[in-house]
Amino acid sequence: MMDCDNPFWNFSLAVYAAPGVAAECLALQRAIDIDVNALLFCAWFGNAKRIALSNDNLQTIDSRVLTWHETVIRRLRTTRQDIKPMPAMADDSVRELRADIARIELRAEQIEQAMLFELAQELEDGAPAITVAEAIRHNVANFLHRNMNPDAACTEPPKAARLIEEAIAYRPA
């Protein structure tokens, strides 16, 4: 059984709730079509394990959750977003349905994070430890660079300064 209430989930809740982080992550999601859970995992892995992820590690992360993310999370998100502009949103029942979908979407994201958390031990084996700040900066930058589409509207390399700052400062309770 997956451990859905794990240190990575707790990190994500705390860091994502910090001022500016959610907006930054969602802007990156829109600009370069990233999986925010995978981005958060890269930051958490740097914080918790102090290990720089290789390109092979990033490929493993993608392949571990891609089907779940595409089949479940994106479809739920699209459904939730498609309902919002409908005239029926004026009805309480439709608003409640949309809120239910949002809760299910969050649960699906928690399951994706549990999948990634299970992967941490595999990625950790044999890798040398570096400082927390170096690991977080490296992992986030490499993840974003790897996900850059050369044809995307984004002309500058994407940055996640708020996420990096909050991930470096994060200490588990």
Image (tube, rainbow, N blue to C red):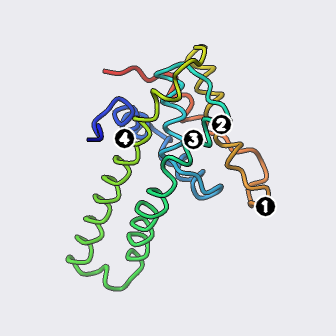
What's the amino acid at mark 4?
Ala
Question: Which image quadrant: the C terminus?
Answer: top left
The residue wearing badge 2 is: 56
Q: Helix, strand, or loop for circle 1?
A: loop
Mark 2 and mark 3 residues within 8 Å of each other at the beta carbon = yes
Q: Give neighbour class at mark 3: few <14, some 14-19, many 20+ (Cα, 10 Å).
A: some
Q: How far is disc 3 from disc 1 in space, using C-alphas?
A: 24 Å
Question: Which image quadrant: the N terminus?
Answer: top left
Q: Position of residue 33 (x, y in %)?
A: 60, 57
The residue wearing badge 4 is: 114
Q: Give neighbour class at mark 4: few <14, some 14-19, many 20+ (Cα, 10 Å).
A: many
What's the amino acid at mark 1?
Asp
User: Which circle, 4 or 1, is nearer the viewer?
Assistant: 4
**Sequence-wise, which precedes: disc 4 or disc 3?**
3
Front position in the image: 15 or 34: 34
User: Which circle, 4 or 3, is nearer the viewer?
Assistant: 3
The numbered disc on residue 121 is none
Q: How far is disc 2 from disc 3 in space, using C-alphas?
A: 6 Å
The residue wearing badge 3 is: 60
Mark 4 and mark 3 residues within 8 Å of each other at the beta carbon = no
Q: Residue placed at 40% from the left, 48% from the top?
A: 112
The residue wearing badge 1 is: 151
What's the amino acid at mark 3?
Thr
**Sequence-wise, which precedes: disc 2 or disc 4?**
2
Number of numbered discs on residues: 4
